[in-house]
Image (spheres, grey):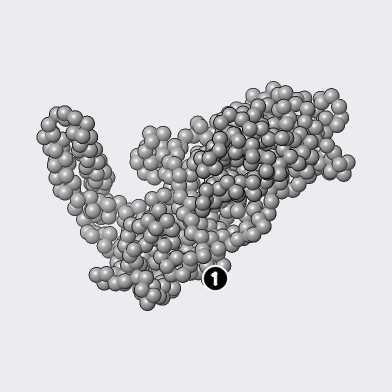
Amino acid sequence: MDFLDAARTRFAPALAPHLPEGASVETFLDLIRPANDPRFGDFQANFAMPLAKRAKKPPRELAAEIAAAAELTDLFEEPEVAGPGFINLRVKDDVLAAETAQLAADERLGVPVAADPRTITVDFSSPNVAKPMHVGHLRTTVIGDAVVRILKFQGHHVIGDNHLGDWGTQFGMLLYGYKNFRDEAAYQADAVTELARLYRTVNALGDYQAAKKKRPKLEAAVEKTRQAVTDFPPPADKAAKKQLFKLKQEAASAADALASATAKIAAIEADPSLKALADAHPEIAAAARNETAKLHAGDSENKRLWEEFLPPCLAALQVIYDRLGVRHDAVYGESFYQPMLADVVEELLQKGIAEESDGAVVVRGNVDPAGKAIPGPFVIRKGDGAFLYGTTDLATVKHHVDELGADAMLYVVDSRQGDHFANVAATARRWGYDETEFKHVSFGTVMGEDRKPFKTRSGDTIGLESLLDEAVERALAIVSENDDAKPDGPELDAAERQAVAEAVGMGGIKYADLAHNRESDYVFSWDKMLSTTGNTATYMQYAHARVCGIFRKGAVDREALRAEFVADDGAVLLTDPSERAMALQLNRFAEAVREASRDHRPNVLTDYLFDTAKAFSAFYDACPIVKAETEELKTSRLILADTTARVMAAGLGLLGIRVLERM
Ligand code: ARG
């Protein structure tokens, strides 16, 4: 049973008379939490302190009053008021034992099916298809997949949508590259690799030309900011120190910008053949943009090439998705929405939501639900008639709500696009989509151990494919070492080791990402993510396999054990504190899923799983299982072990991570 939820339900009516005017009961119910120290009980309610002021009562008195008014004692021992006014709750042992026995027989491990299922679209992964996936696509793919799995498990109707960038400016770069730089034999042999090379070439040449153009300005900026620092008199007070610090920062960032431009120039000039291309194709960025414009205008040659490029690009993406075990329910790429864009803009103009501005069409005055202005204007048609990224997102809202029946639209996209999605949602609300929930499930950047955005040593972005290869390679070494060190000799043959390594490698990458608060940047560290101790997938996977090992060594069939336990109306016995803690932890699975889903935070689930593994090791250390004193106690403990393994497998499964019986 989700005891925390039960406590909330029981306290809600008792709190009602004491709430400040207009306050929601939820705010105060959120102050019921798992206890930090099991000596004080299992849960603790801390709402009496903030409520006492208004009630003009000592918090302890109010706490006692609320505790007495709430109907609790069928589930909990008599509540205790402690300290300044905490209410401590302890689940009754017989209730806990009975609920745990139920949980052991429950396929859903206590997680309820949503009473009010919603239709939710989740936009995740959504790469620009003209270039291979890189490490920047990892977080959206991994977090999005977990969010989808959790919502589906809760019984919602979820449509995981890949909003492919299959229509953008990158295609102009491919088209220009294909027409001018293609190596036909290479293209025939491996289209994706050749297209990637073409993309990189056009991109590098464009960067080079832009950098050359910008260089004089950048040099002047470096000169000016450096001079400003030199000329600054020795700072006499705090304000001056601050001022100087700011100038130094400006000088540093000007120097960075110049260094980056210089590197781009050097990269081309060091290679005579690239330099010749750059000279032969001046203004390449504009030329590539022109190819995009032709594609969008319906040019038949460009359209034909686009149709030719797309399938191999999609196939390459699929290889990565298959390896990660990620799938989408729908793939509505940007190209899908093209026929709708003109109407979207017209409609917004007609309704007076959008306006013309210097030939472009923009939406001004967007505010978030709290009334705060969102940086704008939000451009939906350019002066040359071209539609934008945001126009497509508005058409997507119309499609997802009107055609798919979405009640909520989630966007699993990095935090830098925050203003964009705020503008999409605000415009959509003004357009009439005010019953739809729009949620930007945003996340931070993947950093290298140097705390800068994760790159290869040479400064390139890291391809996803090679990253996955490296994960498996490293995992194989760890798995092999571990297997070799087993007291009775290795257990796995080469094929099994490889399969285990694949699960450990993929699991490691995913878990490391999911275990962090999604909003923070996170540091990518192979050693940390594949460590066999600590809060890692590897540790969890080994913990799971260890529980399975108990059954294997004891020659106990888990299914049969469970079936018999149910048929006999078996009892869970809680004889030791670690046994009781284990049982309580298993009952908290529903709470963990609920809380992880609330604001789409998979790290709530990883924390829970880590605690579960720790609770199991404490239980296992303290309580003999197969050698328990009585047959009844042995069964009870086996049931706890079985349920633990099931909870771990289900929890990791919700994160898209596989477990193994043996590793
Ligand atoms: N393709 C975009 C990018 O790579 C992400 C798309 C996110 N989804 C959306 N509906 N805009 O940045």
Residue 392 shows in this picture: no
Residue 516 shows in this picture: yes
Foreground residue, 323 or 536? 536
Q: Which residue is mark 1?
A: 403
- Ligand 1 has an atom within 8 Å of the beta carbon of the residue at disc 1: no
* Amino acid, disc 1: Glu
Foreground residue, 73 or 122? 73
* For residue 100, side relative to residue 436 (left or right): right
Above or below for 404 versus 93: below
Q: Quadrant of the C terminus?
A: top right
Q: Secondary structure at mark 1?
A: helix
**Quarter where residue 605 is shown:** top right
Foreground residue, 492 or 617? 617
Q: Residue at x 16, y 28 (%)?
A: 236
Above or below for 355 versus 606: below
Q: Position of residue 620 (x, y in %)?
A: 72, 27
Q: Residue at x 48, y 67 (%)?
A: 433
Q: Position of residue 119 (x, y in %)?
A: 59, 62
Q: Residue at x 63, y 48 (%)?
A: 12
Please, which residue is most extreme toward the right here? 568
Foreground residue, 221 or 573? 573
* For residue 639, side relative to residue 292 (left or right): right
Q: Position of residue 554 (x, y in %)?
A: 80, 30
Above or below for 214 versus 433: above
Q: Position of residue 368 (x, y in %)?
A: 41, 58
How many numbered marks, from 0 up? 1
Q: Quadrant of the N terminus?
A: top right
Q: Residue at x 51, y 65 (%)?
A: 435
